[in-house]
């Protein structure tokens, strides 16, 4: 395989190890205490798969360390949010610095991801939402 992605290959190996353990007959019932591996190869696979767990957690935690909710909200000014003093110019310009201090201009506050930094996105960002959805299902995607 040329251009092999070592990360994709490792994820595939992790998936294969787990699939072999979970396949019918991958483990046998041990009357002394639950399921057991069938042979030395099975024991090795079971231990390796168990060791995959902290590695996968470290990978997810590394991503989540980047994608964090910004503490301060960002302000977004919509087309009708300017007060009469701060209407958009004919060139479509607005003085956001003065609008920011103006008590009469309206705005919407958004919490964005510190890493993604896409100003009109609301938290959670797509990366956080995807991880949350994979681990918690749809109910866990609110990011709190
Ligand atoms: Zn993000
Ligand atoms: Zn204003």
Image (tube, rainbow, N blue to C red):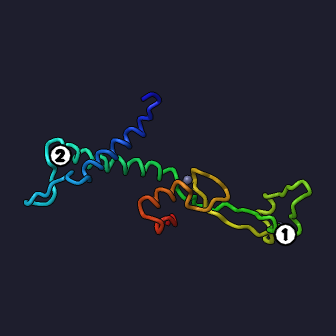
Percent across and percent down for residue 92 are 86, 56
Residue drawn at (52%, 54%) of the image: 127
Q: Which mark is residue 83?
A: 1
Q: Quadrant of the N terminus?
A: top left
Q: CA distance from mark 2 to mark 1?
A: 71 Å
Residue drawn at (61%, 62%) of the image: 122
Q: Secondary structure at mark 2?
A: helix
The vertical placement of 112 against 10, above or below, is below
The vertical placement of 142 against 18, above or below, is below
Earlier in the chain: of badge 2 and badge 1, it is 2
Q: Secondary structure at mark 1?
A: loop
The vertical placement of 61 against 136, above or below, is above
Query: What residue is pinned by disc 2?
Result: 43
Contact (CB < 8 A) between labels 2 and 1? Answer: no
Outermost bottom residue:
104
Q: Quadrant of residue 110?
A: bottom right
Outermost front residue:
24
Residue drawn at (46%, 66%) of the image: 140
Please rate how many residues cluster around mark 1, counting C-alpha atoms within 10 Å: few if below 14, some from 14 to 19, many from 20. some
Q: Is mark 1 within 8 Å of ligand 2?
A: yes
Residue 133 lies left or right of residue 52; in this view the side is right
Total label count? Answer: 2
Residue drawn at (42%, 64%) of the image: 136
Q: Quadrant of residue 69?
A: bottom right
Percent across and percent down for residue 33 are 11, 60
Residue 123 lies left or right of residue 7; in this view the side is right
Residue 78 lies left or right of residue 37; in this view the side is right
Q: Nearer the viewer, mark 2 or mark 1?
A: 2
Outermost right residue:
90
Q: Which mark is residue 95?
A: none
């Amino acid at each position: 395989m040329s251009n092999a992605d070592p990360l994709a290959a490792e994820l595939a190996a992790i998936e294969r190890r787990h699939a072999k353990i979970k396949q019918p007959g991958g483990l046998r019932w041990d009357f002394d205490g639950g399921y057991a591996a069938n042979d030395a190869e099975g024991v090795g696979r079971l231990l390796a798969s168990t060791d995959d767990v902290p590695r996968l957690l470290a990978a997810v935690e590394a991503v989540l360390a980047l994608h964090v909710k910004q503490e301060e909200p960002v302000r977004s000014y919509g087309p009708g949010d300017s007060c009469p003093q701060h209407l958009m110019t004919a060139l479509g310009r607005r003085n956001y610095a003065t609008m920011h201090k103006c008590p009469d201009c309206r705005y919407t506050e958004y919490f964005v991801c510190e890493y993604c930094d896409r100003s009109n996105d609301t938290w959670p960002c797509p990366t956080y939402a995807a991880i949350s959805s994979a681990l918690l299902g749809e109910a866990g995607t609110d990011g709190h």
